[in-house]
Image (cartoon, rainbow, N blue to C red):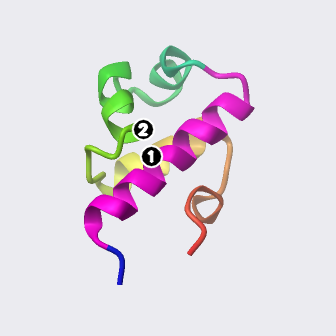
Amino acid sequence: MEETDDILKKFGAAIKRIRKEKGLTQVDIEIKTGIGSADLSRIENGQVNLSFSKLVKLAEGLSVQLNDIYKI
């Protein structure tokens, strides 16, 4: 089983990849979700274990389904 740190890093990398593929900045996501760009940076670097509500906000802000972010 993967360690929590590894999961968070993979998840953060997926968020960053999707954001960049869509041509969005961290500020764009902040505006769409209310999640601050400093917090988003920590998420993308695997330093934050998100609440479910923030996860849903991120998916909505990126216009993706939850299962598109982290493929198990």
Relative image position of residue 7 (x, y in whole percent): 38, 63
**Which corner quadrant of the image does residue 63 belong to?**
top right
Residue 62 can be seen, yes or no:
no
CB within 8 Å, label 2 to label 1 = yes
Q: Which residues are magenta?
A: 3-24
Which structural element holds mark 2?
helix
Q: Which residue is mark 1?
A: 12
Q: Is residue 16 magenta?
A: yes
Q: Give the residue type at disc 1.
A: Gly
Query: What residue appears at the point 49 percent right and 42 percent down from the top-left corner?
Result: 58
Q: Is residue 12 magenta?
A: yes
Q: Give the residue type at disc 2.
A: Glu
Check the image and report above or below for 38 versus 49: above
Query: Which mark is on residue 70?
Result: none
Sequence-first tag of 2 and 1 = 1
Q: Few, some or many C-alpha atoms within 10 Å of disc 1 (few <14, some 14-19, many ≥20)?
A: many
Q: Nearer the viewer, residue 2 or 27?
A: 2
